[in-house]
Amino acid sequence: MRQETRAVPLSGPYLDEREAELVLDVLRSGRLSLGPTVDRFEEMFAEKVGAPYAAAVSSGTAGLHLLCVTNGIGAGDEVITTPYSFAASANCFIYEGAVPVFADIDARTLNVDPRAVEAAVTPRTKAIVAVDIFGYPSELDELQAIADRHGLALIDDSCEALGARYKGAPLGSQGPSAVFAFYPNKQITTGEGGIVTTHSEEEWGLLRSLRNQGRGDEGGWLEHVRLGFNYRIDDIRAALGIGQLEKLDEILALRSSVADRYRELLAGVPGVELPCPDDDDHVRSWFVYVIALPDTATRERVIARFEREQVGFNRYLPSIHLQPYMRERYGFREGMCPVSEDMSSRTLALPFFTALERDAQEHVANVLNSAL
Ligand SMILES: Cc1ncc(COP(=O)(O)O)c(C=O)c1O
């Protein structure tokens, strides 16, 4: 099930006959959408992450957008977030007319630095969108304290972090509502899909209405009680998700051993900085394996070698504020978030997926070593 034709692809899903069987069951049932499989997927997911409620949606981006709506983010509000992320974590509130305020990151964790968040608060700030980048938990307690002090909402973008643990408990079980995503490079996949976890029954009801064109619990198919969206996931994808959740523990363990093997192979290689290790409060769920090289020139030299040797890679992650549409729309420029910009210029994702084999990892390490 490889995504690319490279000798060692960048990523790939981990599926077997069980998913095929579950999907076929749905196809045969005739209940392809708004059926019982979505409810089952949500219940299983909520239990896995220790959240009381979960609402499945069509993508991680859709889930983030819905949390911006439930938190009343609107035109003219400012939302503080990290520049070192995938664009969707900032786009979600721009859809509602809010303005992005980027706070710089911590060079070690690559997550937003709470001190930079505090410094960015203004009377117009409405919310903070934290991102657990590359599966490493954000400083949720510190961010929650800032949010409480200033009366802000805190949204946790855990799209890359299913299975990560903060202060001993899985992400999703803490206070802030969180979003997880299921694109095929994620820990588990539904093809496209996402889910929102919440500790509020009221917010859960709102999420279910908003994803379903604003329909209410009562009333007919053509009665809409609020402005909604079609952000539903269907039962076919939910079935795929159930098959994946059944093997989540196995997937997480395999991904951890792939990461451990990279650490063994790359520790001590001059010029290679490895992802920050776990500590008592932060346990990463492995999404990608991103190293930092000394500078852009070295990274590009490694990439040229990877291309020749058919080793998958990506320049994870460009800083969002320097994306062309951000420069054009808000006039953002270099120098606004120096730590993020520096990391963006020299970080590199290596091939990483659940079934990645040792000999392929050795090949990646050898190619990297020879390029350096
Ligand atoms: C940090 C982060 N946020 C949001 C998303 C958006 O998820 P999706 O692609 O399912 O819309 C992703 C997925 O790539 C992500 O990595």
Image (tube, helix red, strand yellow):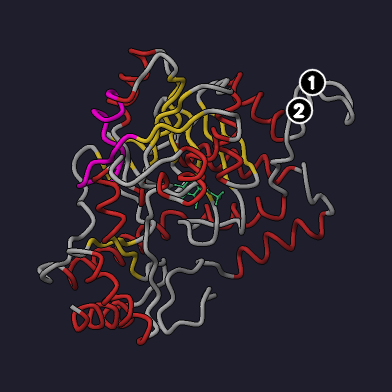
Q: Nearer the viewer, residue 359 or 37?
A: 359
Q: Residues within 10 Å of mark 1 (few under 14, many from 20)?
A: some
Q: Nearer the viewer, residue 61 or 120?
A: 120
Q: Is residue 168 visible?
A: no
Range shown magenta: 103-119
Identify residue for label 1: 225
Which three-letter amino acid code belongs to the residue tagged 1? Val
Q: Position of residue 351 (x, y in %)?
A: 37, 71
- Secondary-structure class at tag 1: loop
Check whether the beta carbons of the residues at disc 2 and disc 1 lie within 8 A of each other. yes
Front residue of this view, candidates 45 and 8: 8
Q: Where residue 246 sits: x, y (%)? A: 52, 54
Q: Is residue 183 above or below residue 89?
A: below
Q: Is residue 60 left or right of residue 10?
A: right
For marks 2 and 1, the one nearer the N-term is 2
Q: Residue at 33% of width from left, 69% of height from top? A: 350
Up-down relation of residue 367 to residue 120 (above or below): below
As for residue 366 lying within the magenta part, the answer is no
**Separation of disc 2 and disc 1 at Cα?**
6 Å
Q: Which residue is mark 2?
A: 214
